[in-house]
Image: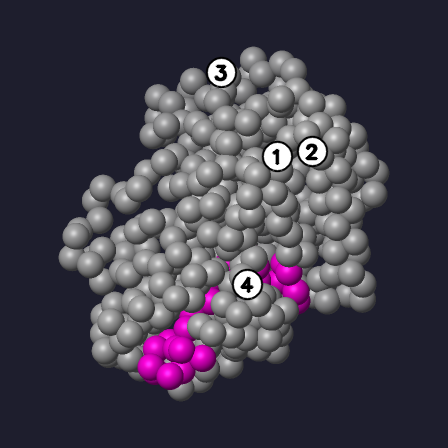
């Protein structure tokens, strides 16, 4: 595989961009080598600047659930662009997207559009603190909720990938208001809640952890969180930036039938363009300015191009059979990868919820961050490069999800499984 132009591009980037990338995991630090620079993408195929083509299972880290450059989404984006890219004033499209989200996501009666998942979570937590008049929040180890100061404590995603325990630049006073508990650990969480209930304003959780690898909740975990937060008048926030519209048209909360007080969305709701959103019950959301005293604003929030892409994406996802087909292909892929690892006698613990797939190079089950960290990351790096050299593009980190789109066909699944059958034996 030739990478002459990618290497040259990376050399240029390093001189003007910290680490040569605008988001840390892209740098390939945990798997070795230099990142590939992508020239274009269509359907499930990425093409880099050297002309190499790959079947993509990163999907821009989640948004491209319809595949890259979907013709209907592109049509909507081009149409919106011709009318202007930003108004700094209300437009009908943002109302239509808000109405569609309210109609689809069970917990949301009103929603505020923002520009990223990080911004959505940051704003939701500010709102929760104002509503409860309590300063502390509780998050779970290995769950990543964006790079806001108070959320980088024991975070997942790029923080886990790069081995950064807690980011410098976060004041100790901020971190002191952030409690952490092991994901799926009811006993440890209950102790923390009992100890800090009087000052605990919100508990935030990825209902399906997707930033320490894919780790589903236990059967009891989410219902228990809903029960205990109601008992102590603590707001429950679901971070569905990844899971929203991916595992179910109504998100993980619709899949598991557990309804939080606030929900954060991103990725898919913008169809590949920058966007985020947070929403909840009307009485909570009415505290946001200008309706209420909690200030939050954004120049590009609800911009017409992003909302056009999101509207078309969600409408297409509501077509009959979309999630059923995604489930079938995801199940087939997971089965094929598992069988390939087993035949090669490589320890490989698999997880999956819908079109989110996980695989840890470890013997035992993985139910939390401590278990995820036991995975053999050196073996993953070798697996990553083996698949990449055969035209399969996976996340350059053990701690990220493998994602499918509606553009992945049975042929792509067979190609990926066949490649894995060749690569797994090289990992012994």
Query: Earlier along the polypeptide chain: callout 1 or callout 4?
Result: 4
In the picture, the disc for residue 341 is 2
In the picture, the disc for residue 276 is none
Q: Which residues are magenta?
A: 227-249
The CA distance from mark 1 to mark 4 is 22 Å
Relative to 315, is 175 on the left or the right? left
Residue picked out by circle 1 = 347
Q: Residues within 10 Å of mark 1 (few under 14, many from 20)?
A: some
- In what element is the residue under mark 1? loop
Relative to 278, is 192 on the left or the right? left
Residue picked out by circle 3 = 8
Q: In this rendering, does residue 266 appear at all? A: no
In the picture, the disc for residue 218 is 4
Q: Quadrant of residue 325?
A: bottom right
Residue 232, horizontal then vertical, whole percent: 33, 81
Q: Residue at x 43, y 53 (%)?
A: 143
Residue 219, horizontal then vertical, whole percent: 57, 67
């Amino acid at each position: 595989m030739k990478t002459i132009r990618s290497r040259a591009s990376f050399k240029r980037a390093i001189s003007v961009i910290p680490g040569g990338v605008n988001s840390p995991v892209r740098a390939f630090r945990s798997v070795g080598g230099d990142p590939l620079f992508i020239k274009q993408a269509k359907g499930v195929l990425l093409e880099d600047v050297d002309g190499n083509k790959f079947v993509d299972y990163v999907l821009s880290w989640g948004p491209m659930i319809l595949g890259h450059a979907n013709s209907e989404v592109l049509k909507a984006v081009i149409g919106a662009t011709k009318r202007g890219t930003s108004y700094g004033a209300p437009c009908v499209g943002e109302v239509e997207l808000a109405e569609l989200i309210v109609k689809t996501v069970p917990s949301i009666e009103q929603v505020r559009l923002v520009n990223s998942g990080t911004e959505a979570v940051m704003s939701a937590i500010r709102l929760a603190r104002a509503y409860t008049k309590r300063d502390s929040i509780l998050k779970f180890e290995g769950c990543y909720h964006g790079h806001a100061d108070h959320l980088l404590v024991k975070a997942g995603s790029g923080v886990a990938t790069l081995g950064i325990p807690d980011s410098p630049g976060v004041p100790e006073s901020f971190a002191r208001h952030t409690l952490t508990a092991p994901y799926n650990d009811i006993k440890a969480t209950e102790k923390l809640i009992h100890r800090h209930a009087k000052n605990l304003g919100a508990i935030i959780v990825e209902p399906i952890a997707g930033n320490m690898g894919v780790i589903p909740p236990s059967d009891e975990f989410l219902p228990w969180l809903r029960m205990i937060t109601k008992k102590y008048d603590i707001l429950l926030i679901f971070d569905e930036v990844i899971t929203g519209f991916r595992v179910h048209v109504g998100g993980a909360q619709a899949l598991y039938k557990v309804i939080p007080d606030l929900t954060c969305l991103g990725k898919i709701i913008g169809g590949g363009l920058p966007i985020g959103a947070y929403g909840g019950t009307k009485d909570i959301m009415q505290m946001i300015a200008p309706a209420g005293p909690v200030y939050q604003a954004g120049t590009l929030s609800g911009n017409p191009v992003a909302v056009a892409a999101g509207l078309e994406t969600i409408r297409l996802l509501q077509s009959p059979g979309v999630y059923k087909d995604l489930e079938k292909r995801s199940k087939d892929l997971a089965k094929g990868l598992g069988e390939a690892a087993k035949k090669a006698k490589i320890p490989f613990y698999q997880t999956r919820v819908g079109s989110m797939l996980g695989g840890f190079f470890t013997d035992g089950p993985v139910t939390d961050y401590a278990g995820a960290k036991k995975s053999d990351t050196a073996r993953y790096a070798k697996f990553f490069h083996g698949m990449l050299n055969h035209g399969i593009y996976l996340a350059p980190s053990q701690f990220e999800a493998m994602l499918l789109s509606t553009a992945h066909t049975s042929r792509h699944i067979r190609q990926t499984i066949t490649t894995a059958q060749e690569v797994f034996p090289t990992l012994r």
